[in-house]
Image (cartoon, helix red, strand yellow):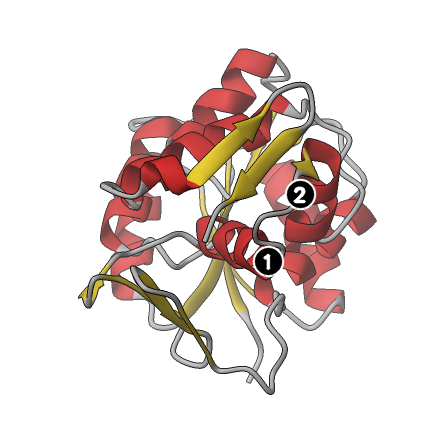
């Protein structure tokens, strides 16, 4: 079964270019051209695998859609695809839960590579289904995470970030290492994006947020 992607883009020409290219890559594409249409399709279309979302949209902007998508279905990856190239916009998108952020103009092959990365993440070895420590446990087969036996909902990026830190526990990891390993490609954006994701992850693993340590001038480590 082909992966189903919702493309939310008000520029018809751009939307069709994305659709035509992704169809050749064997994806099924659903198009929305304004915020209301996007919400309707998001809730009424079964098995959406990923969302490509512009910020500047009629009726409802992309930020409000992102908030709702990530509240209702946090495990569906969302790629922001926008002309807003300011670092503050990118960090804001990540803070709202975006899994990736691509600025226009962009290369279609890069877009496809990042889609594949989000849809095919497999940082944990397939032979390892569970990771358990005294305060947390993860089930990679079910893609579930628990703190003291209570399930905590993480976005795909947050989940993979936590997995990567745990696989390299007690090791000081640079931001570049984390970005390249978790995102799955050489990341050319601002490395402060990792700070935003760590901040969100710390909040979600409270009261054990102090387990993720900042290593000054280097990056992060998790102490287990």
* Whether residue 212 is situated above or below residue 19 in the rendered picture: above
Element marked by disc 1: helix
Residue 10 rendering spot, x and y as whole percentages:
49, 34
Separation of marks 1 and 2 at Cα, in angstroms: 15 Å
Instruction: Using the image as rendered, state which of residue 90 and residue 39 is in the foreground.
Output: 90
Residue sitting at x 71%, y 35%: 174
Residue 175 rendering spot, x and y as whole percentages:
68, 33
The residue pinned by badge 1 equals 118
Residue sitting at x 38%, y 59%: 75
Relative placement, left or right, of 190 versus 224 is right
Circle 1 or circle 2, nearest the eye: 2
Residue sitting at x 58%, y 78%: 2
Instruction: Using the image as rendered, state which of residue 8 and residue 64 is in the foreground.
Output: 64
Element marked by disc 2: helix
Instruction: Using the image as rendered, state which of residue 145 and residue 118 is in the foreground.
Output: 145
Q: Residues within 10 Å of mark 1 (few under 14, many from 20)?
A: many
Callouts 1 and 2 close, C-beta under 8 Å: no
**Mark linked to residue 178:** 2
Residue 181 rendering spot, x and y as whole percentages:
71, 51
Residue sitting at x 76%, y 67%: 24
Task: Please report whichever mark, 1 or 2, sits nearer to the chain's N-terminal start.
Answer: 1
Q: In which quarter of the image is residue 207?
A: top left
């Amino acid at each position: 079964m082909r992966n189903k992607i919702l493309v939310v883009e008000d520029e018809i020409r751009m939307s069709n270019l994305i659709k035509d290219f992704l169809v050749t890559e064997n994806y099924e594409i659903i198009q929305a051209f304004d915020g209301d249409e996007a919400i309707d399709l998001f809730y009424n279309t079964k098995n959406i695998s990923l969302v490509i979302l512009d910020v500047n949209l009629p009726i409802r902007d992309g930020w409000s859609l992102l908030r709702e998508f990530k509240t209702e279905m946090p495990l569906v990856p969302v790629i922001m695809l926008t002309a807003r190239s300011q670092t503050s916009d990118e960090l804001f998108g990540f803070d709202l839960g975006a899994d990736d952020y691509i600025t226009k103009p962009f290369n279609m092959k890069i877009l496809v590579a990042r889609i594949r990365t989000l849809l095919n993440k497999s940082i944990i070895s397939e032979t390892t289904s569970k990771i358990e420590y005294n305060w947390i446990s993860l089930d990679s087969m079910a893609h579930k995470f628990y703190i003291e036996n209570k399930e905590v909902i993480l976005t795909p990026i947050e989940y993979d970030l936590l997995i990567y830190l745990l696989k390299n526990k007690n090791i000081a990891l640079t931001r570049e290492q984390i970005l390249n390993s978790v995102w799955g490609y050489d990341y050319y954006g601002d490395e402060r994006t990792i700070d935003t994701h760590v901040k969100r992850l710390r909040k979600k693993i409270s009261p054990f947020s102090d387990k993720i340590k900042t290593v000054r001038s280097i990056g992060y480590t998790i102490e287990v």
